[in-house]
Amino acid sequence: MSNLIEIRWHGRGGQGAKTASLLLADAAFNTGKYIQGFPEYGPERMGAPITAYNRISDTPITVHSNIYEPDYVVVVDDTLLECVDVTAGLKSTGAIIVNTTKDNDELKQLLKGYSGEIYKIDARKISMETLGKYFPNTPMLAAVVKVSGIMSDEAFLEDMVGSFKHKFAKKPEVIDGNMKALEMALKEVTKV
Amino acid sequence: MGIRERLSGNEAAAIAMKQINPDVVAAFPITPSTEIPQYFSSFVSNGQVDTEFVAVESEHSAMSACIGAEAAGARAMTATSANGLSLMWEMIYIASSLRLPIVMSLVNRAVSGPLNIHNDHSDAMGVRDAGWIMLFSENNQEAYDNLLMAHRIAENKDVLLPLMVCQDGFITSHSIENIELLEDDKVKAFVGKYKPEHYLLNDKEPIAVGPLDVQSYLFEHKAQQAEAMKNAKKVILEVSKEFEELTGRKYEFFEKYKMEDSELVIVCMNSTAGTAKAAIDELRAQGIKAGLLKIRMFRPFPAEEVAESLKNAKAIAVLDKADSLNGAGGALFEDVVSGMYVSNIHVPTVNYVYGIGGRDTTVNEIKQVYTDLAKIAETGNIGDPYRYLGLRRK
């Protein structure tokens, strides 16, 4: 199980954290991996904190529980940093990726001395520039692929074109924007 | 070779139904099984199946429509969860006593109240004596495979009983995982055509279905149902063997994981079995002889075979994902221990009620059960046999 990568997503209802976890599972599946992608369903409301998970492995996965000691945490909305313990159980050998415009010191302070790697990205800016609307999940998906190194940028982008063509079969006009958002996010995610 | 895919448990069930292409599907939506009729109705709209989809106004009507269809001579399927199954309850017994091989996908969820939409097995346990064959599934693959085998088992003339395929709500129904699908033509050939012997739409043989059954007959008819349930064991093995030849995937009454030399054994059903396997792998690396007996066929219950498989254990824990609230123990526990007692096998055995209302069950919790079992094996002291796993005490 040493090749197992576990990822926990924190977002707010409506921001697409669940969809992002399913897209990541899809992309990893297409590179030949064993995958799990599942949300933790609570009382779902727009804006309420939600959690979603991924397991990605070279060997079959049998565990069916939530993830308590993730390798990576993705925070889709930085207002969650004040109300959710996002680094709970996060391995110090892992990393956290936050969608934020906060400066490095403030971010570190909010992460309460987490000793692993911290990455940040301005997913709002990327989303507004490429899609004209705020859909943070697309940039965050690219950011976690980049940081975790689950697959190469090229393999990821190639796979996502296919996924978006399928997902947006009825509105193909948004495919280009989403691809641009992924490309920008791969470049703009930075280590704090 | 099959088709490599990634699907949720609900998608897997819906695709199995698409490939089976039954004559009638009647269903009413209820979380967490809603997606099954939702996906299936799109297959109907897209012309991918030629099923008559009956969008009924309640689960009672869903089961009634399946009964009517099956009695008429059609192959009928449905899907439901929790309170949906509760509302079917009256008709669940009618289906089995009329010997109608209806197939249901049951996505297990806690029966209210208080209201809870998450997973446990209280819905399935409520119908455990209703005369349905009940197969449990660890993951999406098993939910799919069990459905593909379901009609072959249920429609066998020595059986003729309805069958439900269970999987854990949300935990597997809403989790995307790898799966290997069979090609459509192979499923079609394996499942075959439904050829009922007696049915209402046969104008050559007018029959009555469901008339009054008085004191002089009901007892005998119930005994015939019981006999059919016993016959199902042989048929389940035969169909599973044929399925293994087709797919390479082996199914029996239960799966034995690391049982050859195991001293400490957990017995459980559905998705927790997968979590237990991960715990066992960790414990085996430390030299602890932990094993798992995962029940696939809960009805009929393989009492003798379970007992035989457990006879060399030093301590056993039976995990029940439903509390029978009887002050004595859960349903699976009682079946396992009575099976062992009748076979004159006496191994210290305890019961853990766990995972109620979607409470998550972790690898560490399962490892704790094995730690408890090691102590029981060492001291011979069972303590309280009726325990909880994962219950908050403060």
Image (cartoon, rainbow, N blue to C red):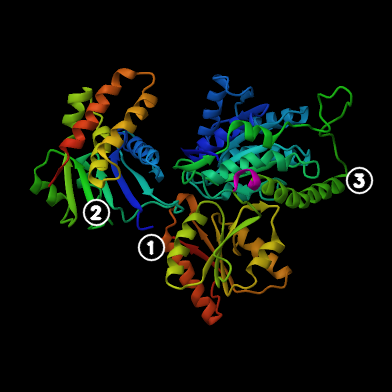
What amino acid is found at the position of numbered circle 1 in the picture?
A: Lys
Mark in the foreground, 1 or 2:
2
Main SS category, magenta section: helix
Q: Residue at x 65, y 66 (%)?
A: B309
Q: Residues within 10 Å of mark 3 (few under 14, many from 20)?
A: few
Q: Position of residue A184 (x, y in %)?
A: 19, 32
Q: Is residue B200 visible?
A: yes
Asked if marks 1 and 3 fall on the same chain, the answer is yes
Residue A123 included in the magenta stretch of the image: no
SS label for mark 2:
loop
Q: Position of residue B343 (x, y in %)?
A: 73, 69
Q: In the figure, residue B386 lies in which quadrant?
A: bottom right
Cα separation, mark 2 vs mark 3, equals: 72 Å
Mark in the foreground, 1 or 3:
3
Q: Would you name the residue on which mark 2 appears? A: A94
Q: Would you name the residue on which mark 3 appears? A: B216
Q: Reply above or below: B85 against B346.
A: above
Q: Chain of mark 2?
A: A
Q: Residues within 10 Å of mark 1 (few under 14, many from 20)?
A: few
Magenta region: which residues? B244-248
Q: Are marks 2 and 3 in contact (CB under 8 Å)?
A: no
Q: Reply above or below: B111 against B68.
A: below
Disc nearer the start of the sequence (1/3): 3
Asked if marks 2 and 3 fall on the same chain, the answer is no
Disc number for residue B173: none
Taking depth in this image into account, of B320 and B301 the one nearest to the observer is B301
Q: Is residue A40 visible?
A: no
Q: Chain of mark 1?
A: B
What amino acid is found at the position of numbered circle 2 in the picture?
A: Gly
Q: In the figure, residue B62 lies in which quadrant?
A: top right
Q: Would you name the residue on which mark 1 appears? A: B394
What amino acid is found at the position of numbered circle 3 in the picture?
A: Ser
